[in-house]
């Protein structure tokens, strides 16, 4: 989790660590019931999870716009299909709860972890 926290620099004055920690805790399933029983943590995590889909939609539309601009010679940034697929996969994994160390089949009915 330490690798996900941005390093402080002169350009980044205020780094918001709480949202990063809450999101990583949610994704790695390390938040326990006692953590979620704290009102501010539960409310902040809910706010983050509710707002993420719209942010991902914005990132996808901007990524596709940059890709199109590069193809037309209007942008020096080369955006590949892999970049777009990574955003889509991240969104699906986050929203469906399938993340690291989880079997893809565990989301199907009748398939349970042994």
Image (spheres, grey):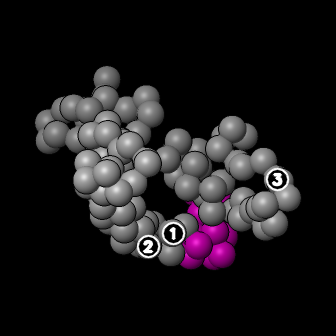
Q: Is residue 8 left or right of residue 33?
A: right
Give the spatial CA distance, label 2 vs label 3.
Answer: 25 Å
The 10 Å Cα crowd at callout 1, few under 14, some 14 to 19, many 20 or more, is some
Asked whether 39 or 25 is in front, the reply is 25
For the point 70% across and 48% down, which residue is it? Answer: 5
Q: Which residue is mark 3?
A: 8
Q: Residue at x 55, y 55 (%)?
A: 23
- Residue at 41% in and 72% down: 50
Report whether 8 appears left or right of 96: right
The answer to whether mark 1 and mark 2 are in CB contact below 8 A is yes
Mark 2 neighbour density, 10 Å: few (under 14) some (14–19) many (20 or more): few
Residue 26 is a magenta residue:
no
Q: Nearer the viewer, residue 85 or 34?
A: 85
Point out residue 39 in the picture as x, y percentages from the top left corner: 63, 76
Q: Which residues are magenta?
A: 33-44
How far, Cα to Cα, is label 1 from label 2? 5 Å
Q: Mark 3 packing: few (<14 Cα in 10 Å), some, or many (20+)?
A: few
By secondary structure, the bulk of the magenta-drawn segment is best described as helix
Residue highlighted by disc 1:
48
Label 2: state its secondary structure: helix
Confirm whether the magenta stretch covers residue 41: yes
């Amino acid at each position: 989790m330490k690798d996900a926290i941005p390093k402080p620099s002169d350009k980044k004055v205020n780094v918001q660590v709480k949202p990063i920690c809450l999101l990583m805790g949610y994704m790695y399933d390390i938040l326990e019931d006692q953590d979620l029983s704290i009102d501010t943590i539960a409310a902040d995590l809910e706010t983050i999870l509710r707002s993420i889909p719209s942010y991902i939609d914005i990132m996808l539309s901007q990524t596709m716009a940059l890709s199109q601009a590069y193809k037309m010679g209007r942008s020096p940034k080369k955006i590949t299909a892999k970049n777009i697929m990574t955003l889509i996969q991240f969104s699906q994994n986050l929203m469906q709860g399938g993340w690291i160390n989880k079997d893809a089949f565990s989301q199907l009915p009748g398939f349970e972890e042994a």
